[in-house]
Amino acid sequence: MKRILAVTVATMMLTTPAVAHTPYLVPFNFAPTEGVVTVHNGLTNNTFFVPEFPIKGDDYEVTDADGKVTAGKGVSFTEVGLFEAKLSAEGTYRISTGNRDVRTLNLARIDGKWRPVKMPVNGVVPEPFVDQSKLSPTSRIVPVKTMVRAETYISYKKPSTMAPPPDGKGLEIVPLTHPNQLFAGGIFQFRLAFDGKPLADTEWQAFRANDAYAARTFNMSGKTASDGTAQINFAEPGVYVIEILRNWEKGNPEDPRTWLSSLTLEVAQ
């Protein structure tokens, strides 16, 4: 699994959201009637929700409508991660992996492109890595962290008037429409933010689960407006995933990080 993880994260560094593996977090029930809900997470090659392996780490955050955060621990298996959240009161909750540092890769500028590099082990360097030992001694090597955040919303017994407030840390998809009151034919409005500030002109993509069996697949993309907002018209019911990738070159050069964030939503009939 470590071999697969290294290759996948390296690919995420080099590709757009359309072809990178997507992290997700999905509950077994978006409207639980008991005081507990179980979620599972994974990284998938855009086949939802079929995980290839879990998101690294076992820490979770459960945030209620008042902004109270409860930390929890899950468990990871070979293909999937699981977490059981206790729900103390009626209302809407955000369940999140939080910002997880899943990998640090060394990148080098080669033929005008940033490529992942690695020193050989027993003379072997796996694809898509480039043999670091063969680079010029003056080559610039940049250690880039990959940060992953996956979230979903559930409502215990009944939705709260307002959704839980944003965390204000890292790359977030902030709902402006209540995330548990979405219906086919309606519009979902959201804002992209980084460290609490709107992200303008930023690409997003949306996918629908179980499209492998559908006669017509759903794949929508767009860019945020100057205030960081965007909207999606969900014409059909289903479970959808919105994904955002922010390349490390758009961030702090002193702390290079690639960010990948997703939000899973249910659209009712």
Image: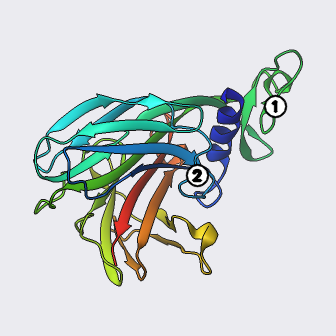
Q: Nearer the viewer, residue 51 or 205?
A: 51
- Residue at 62 percent of width and 43 percent of height: 52
Residue 95 image offset from top left, x and y in percent: 30, 45
- Residue at 16 percent of width and 46 percent of height: 64
Q: Nearer the viewer, residue 118 or 263?
A: 263
Visible in this render: residue 254?
no
What quarter of the picture does the C terminus occupy?
Answer: bottom left
Crowding around mark 2 (Cα neighbors within 10 Å: few <14, some 14 to 19, many 20+) is some
**Badge number at residue 219:** none
Query: What residue is shown with label 2?
Result: 50
Amino acid found under the numbered disc labelled 2: Val
Q: Give the residue at the far right of this rendering.
A: 123
- Counting residues from the start of the chain, the first of labels 2 and 1 encountered is 2
- Residue at 48 percent of width and 72 percent of height: 222
Colour mapping: rainbow
Residue 43 placement, left or right of 185 = right
What quarter of the picture does the N terminus occupy?
Answer: top right
Visible in this render: residue 268?
yes
Crowding around mark 1 (Cα neighbors within 10 Å: few <14, some 14 to 19, many 20+) is some
Which numbered mark, 2 or 1, is in the foreground of this view?
Answer: 2
Quadrant in the picture for residue 75: top left
Per the model, the C-alpha gap separating discs 2 and 1 is: 25 Å
Q: Nearer the viewer, residue 61 or 121?
A: 61
Residue 4 image offset from top left, x and y in percent: 70, 35
Query: What residue is shown with label 1?
Result: 126
